[in-house]
Image: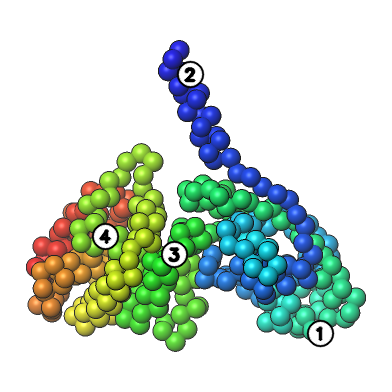
């Protein structure tokens, strides 16, 4: 009985701690656009997610707004900082960023309508081209918003993002981290993801990176985070247990490293850039390719593989900075020979983020490169 009372008390504490305070409000589109322009509502795609709606999808939303078709609620998180002049609290978007970006871009004549069916006469029109009565209708159209108190911890905020992630294009894991764990290390990861050698290794076209799906989903930024989560034998801290997985391991790394000093971040940046430079130089542009050993020979299966990246990039870093190894040209073939081992190949497929598989392929890679 005493155990039950304790459990009930514990449940009450959790329920109290995780209860979210909200406030409903409606904004007309003209007001929303003004708030976005003034920074009252933070709509920088780099803050939450990279805008992924194409013009046709955005146009369909504008058509729905003109026709007064119901639009899902927009969820805003109230932030701590306050506009000094107006004393308005600032907000960041939890769910609805794609919709608000589409509205904001259209009101600022950044795209013309296309693919409309009900209002096909408007195809090709920018906002400035709309007849006055439609301009007024759009400006006066309201969207329901739910404002959420942000005095909650990061994990609760993550839960909110995941539960309210109702858009047609789902938030990816790194997009969630980017929204919740904003800070200097997060900013560094986004900056390093633009490194030319890194993009070449990820098979991202350096002339038009914005068109690459990895960039759109922020997978490139997650790969930078993975690098720092695994280097200096930090991979040994990852123990896959109930309630803990690699996704949580990366989130914990992001939260921890956001508290690093500026000196630490400079060191991180230098080491990442140099590691990628050496990998391209010694292993070539397809260093993170995956191979399969069949009929007595290696056959390339892909030019980039996450599991191979997790093994090679941290291993090279650790040997460069912990063992003063300056070149791997004499070890390239020995690394490729690992793919001939059934155990190594098995560590790259299936549940490749199992603790044992991750540890095994990093250890084997380091042995091959030493």
Is label 4 in a helix, a strand or a loop? helix
Quarter of the image with the N terminus in it = top left
Q: Nearer the viewer, mark 3 or mark 4?
A: 3
User: Gap between marks 2 and 3, in whole Å?
Assistant: 41 Å
Q: Residue at x 22, y 52 (%)?
A: 236
The residue wearing badge 2 is 5
In this rendering, the label closer to the viewer, 3 or 1: 3
Query: Considering depth in this image, is 211 or 136 the residue closer to the camera?
Result: 136
Q: Distance between the residues labelled 2 and 4?
A: 42 Å
Q: Where's the C terminus, which quadrant?
A: bottom left
**Which numbered disc covers residue 328?**
none
State how far apart marks 1 and 2 are (Cα): 67 Å
- From this view, report whether residue 72 is shown above or below residue 16: below
Q: What element carries label 3?
A: loop
Instruction: Give residue 272's quadrant in the image.
Output: bottom left
Tell which of 129 and 32 is nearer to you: 32
To which residue does mark 4 refer?
Answer: 230
Disc 3 to disc 1: CB gap under 8 Å: no
State the residue at coordinates (53%, 48%): 152
Instruction: List the residue tagged with mark 1.
Output: 129
Badge 3: residue crowd in 10 Å (few <14, some 14–19, many ≥20): some
Separation of residues labelled 3 and 4 (CA atoms): 20 Å
Q: Earlier in the sequence, mark 1 or mark 2?
A: 2
The disc placed on residue 183 is 3
Is residue 358 placed above or below 186 in the rendered structure?
above
Task: Estimate the x, y position of residue 98 in percent, counting from the top left.
Answer: 63, 66
């Amino acid at each position: 009985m005493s155990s039950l009372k304790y459990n009930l008390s514990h449940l009450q504490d959790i329920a109290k701690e995780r209860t979210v305070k909200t406030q409903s409000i409606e904004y007309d589109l003209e007001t929303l656009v003004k708030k976005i322009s003034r920074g009252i509502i933070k709509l920088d795609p780099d803050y939450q997610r990279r805008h992924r709606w194409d013009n046709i999808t955005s146009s369909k939303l504008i058509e729905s707004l003109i026709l007064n078709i119901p639009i899902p609620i927009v969820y805003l998180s109230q932030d701590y900082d306050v506009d000094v002049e107006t004393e308005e609290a600032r907000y960041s978007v939890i769910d609805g960023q794609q919709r608000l970006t589409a509205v904001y871009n259209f009101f600022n004549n950044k795209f013309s309508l296309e693919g409309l069916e009900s209002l096909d006469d408007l195809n090709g029109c920018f906002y400035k081209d709309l007849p006055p009565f439609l301009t007024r209708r759009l400006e006066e159209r309201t969207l329901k918003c739910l404002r959420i108190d942000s005095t909650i911890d990061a994990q609760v905020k993550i839960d909110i993002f995941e539960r309210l992630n109702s858009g047609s294009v789902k938030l990816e894991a790194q997009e969630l981290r980017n929204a919740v764990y904003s800070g200097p290390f997060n900013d560094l990861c986004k900056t390093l993801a633009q490194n030319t050698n890194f993009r070449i290794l990820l098979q991202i076209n350096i002339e038009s990176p914005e068109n690459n799906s990895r960039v759109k989903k922020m997978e490139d930024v997650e790969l930078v985070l993975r690098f720092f989560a695994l280097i200096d034998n930090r991979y040994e801290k990852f123990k896959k247990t109930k309630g803990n997985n690699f996704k949580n391991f990366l989130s914990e790394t992001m939260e921890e490293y956001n508290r690093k000093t500026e000196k630490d971040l400079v060191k991180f940046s230098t080491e990442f850039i140099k590691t990628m430079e050496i990998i391209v130089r010694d292993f070539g542009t397809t260093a993170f390719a995956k191979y399969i050993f069949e009929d007595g020979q290696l056959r390339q299966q892909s030019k980039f593989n996450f599991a191979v990246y997790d093994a090679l990039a941290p291993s090279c870093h650790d040997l460069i900075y912990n063992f003063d190894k300056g070149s791997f040209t004499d070890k390239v073939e020995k690394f490729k020979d690992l793919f001939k081992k059934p155990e190594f190949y098995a560590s790259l497929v299936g549940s490749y983020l199992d603790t044992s598989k991750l540890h095994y392929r990093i250890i084997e890679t380091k042995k091959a490169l030493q």
